[in-house]
Image (cartoon, rainbow, N blue to C red):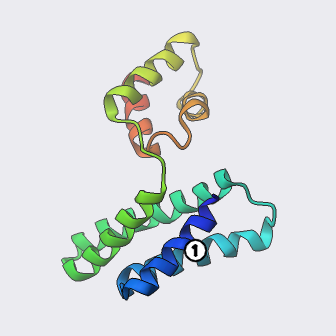
Amino acid sequence: MSVLDTLQADMKTAMKAGDAKRLSAIRMLISAVRYVTIDKPDMTDADMLDVLRREAKKRRESVQAYTDAGRTEQAEAEQFELALIESYLPAQMDERVVRTKVQEVLGATHYDNFGLAMQAVMKELKGKADGGLVSRIVKELYT
């Protein structure tokens, strides 16, 4: 079952349950996936997961912005959507595992600059670990 099929099945479940908040968030995700299919009609599940990762990143940034501004109600709404999006994404590696993988990649080869080091590490960890976490660890180990 593809990611889009799963979203559509969950949308029907939310409709039947009368869960308006969940229904709205799932509709937003389906819309985001379908919007990308306009430019790329032959999307794979990996492409759909990339769309969901981008949506999750937007929600993380919004939660932080609303929290900083003292707008707790909006932050909670964004946090709900973030939790829903993350339920469709594969589990992310924890910091300890990411640190080990980064050390393996950086230990094998010397890189001339931070960008090349990040590129090599992200080739191994894309979709498996948060980019911000990877960046922080690479900075610690690279400098």
Looking at the figure, which quarter contains the N terminus?
A: bottom right
**Relative image position of residue 80 (x, y in whole percent):** 32, 71
**Relative image position of residue 48 (x, y in whole percent):** 63, 59
**Relative image position of residue 128 (x, y in whole percent):** 49, 39
Which SS class for mark 1? helix
Residue 79, quarter of the rendered image: bottom left
Could you tell me the amino acid type at mark 1?
Gln
**Relative image position of residue 87 (x, y in whole percent):** 41, 58
In the rendered structure, the answer to whether residue 60 lies left or right of residue 52 reads left
Is 135 in front, or is 16? Answer: 16
Is 90 in front, or is 101? Answer: 90
**Is 92 above or below relative to 80?**
above
Residue extending furthest top?
Answer: 108
Is 102 in front, or is 111? Answer: 102
Residue 116, quarter of the rendered image: top right
Q: Which residue is mark 1?
A: 8
Q: Which residue is painted at 50% across and 12% down in the image?
A: 107
Q: Which residue is painted at 56% across and 27% down in the image?
A: 117
Looking at the figure, which quarter contains the C terminus?
A: top left
